[in-house]
Image (cartoon, rainbow, N blue to C red):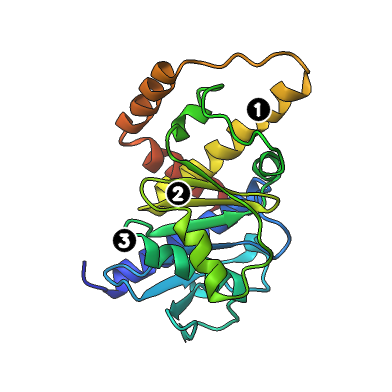
């Protein structure tokens, strides 16, 4: 796909919408965390939210364009260092990692603090991610290229959700719509897991066969992500 003004504007608009939607649902943490989107038609540049503004106030014009050296080649603002290292690493590691979302959203982060972690066999929402989850031990702030590369190595293959232990989560998707849908349903799945575990009662786990069947059923709903993102676009403007 050639880069045109229209495709770039659409990309900026969708990324800004996802950021405002995350703020709307309380998925952000102050001015921290970060979302990125590969520039359409290019593998050497990506859009990133600037460090400083609250996500609820971000618009398409606020999105920065970075090259793989971390230089802001378009836009006004500062790219946070750990954001650059994490997102560059993941974008470089996978050609299909067009959209990468990183949050410290509360329930998913709570799950990242537990030894047993996220269970993809206990709820319909969790089964969306069955066979597509990675877990990575914490190793400090991602201020260097090697830490970005370490995180990138954990999301190879078909990983769609990565739990960074004692830290937060990453969502990896080919489009903003799919990334947003996964971010939303991951947090909801983690919320009900936390609630179920808090009862102290044994958790009903489904079989591998059923979990895979439901994952395939989720995958067959080709319009679900687009409809979900369109709905949230109407909510946040």
Q: Between disc 2 and disc 1, whose residue precedes?
A: 2
Residue 80 against residue 159 in the figure, above or below? below
Q: Give the percent coordinates (x, y) of residue 139.
A: 66, 61
SS for dot 2:
helix
Mark 3: few/some/many CA within 10 Å (<14, 14-19, 20+)? few
Q: Between disc 3 and disc 2, whose residue precedes?
A: 3
Q: Residue 180: tell me if it is visible.
A: yes
Question: Observer-nearest residue: 230 or 148?
Answer: 148
Disc number lying in front (3 or 2): 3
- To which residue does mark 1 refer? 193
Q: Residue 49: tell me if it is visible.
A: no
Residue 159 against residue 100 in the figure, above or below? above
Kindly identify the residue that appears in the image at 59 percent across and 82 percent down.
77
SS for dot 1:
helix
Q: Give the percent coordinates (x, y) of residue 47.
A: 45, 70
Relative to 75, 51 lies left or right: right
Question: Observer-nearest residue: 76 or 79?
Answer: 79
- To which residue does mark 2 refer? 179
């Amino acid at each position: 796909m050639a880069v045109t003004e229209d495709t770039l504007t659409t990309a900026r608009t969708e990324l800004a919408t996802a950021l405002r939607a995350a703020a709307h649902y309380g998925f952000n943490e102050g001015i921290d965390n970060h979302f990125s989107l590969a520039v359409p038609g290019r593998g050497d540049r990506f859009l990133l939210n600037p460090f400083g503004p609250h996500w609820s106030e971000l618009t398409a014009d606020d999105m920065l364009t970075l090259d793989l050296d971390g230089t802001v080649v378009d836009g006004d603002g500062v790219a946070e260092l750990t954001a650059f290292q994490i997102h560059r690493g993941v974008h470089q590691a996978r050609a299909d990692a067009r959209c990468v979302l990183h949050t410290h959203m509360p329930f998913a982060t709570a799950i990242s603090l537990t030894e047993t972690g996220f269970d993809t066999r206990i709820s319909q929402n969790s089964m969306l991610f069955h066979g597509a989850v990675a877990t990575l031990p914490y190793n400090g702030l991602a201020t260097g290229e090697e830490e970005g590369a370490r995180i990138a190595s954990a999301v190879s293959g078909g990983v769609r959700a990565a739990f960074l232990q004692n830290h937060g989560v990453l969502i990896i998707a080919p489009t903003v719509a799919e990334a947003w849908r996964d971010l939303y349903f991951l947090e909801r799945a983690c919320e009900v897991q936390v609630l179920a575990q808090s009862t102290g009662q044994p958790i009903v786990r489904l079989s591998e066969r059923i979990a895979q069947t439901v994952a395939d059923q989720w995958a067959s709903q080709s319009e679900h992500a687009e409809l979900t993102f369109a709905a949230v676009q109407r909510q946040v403007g």
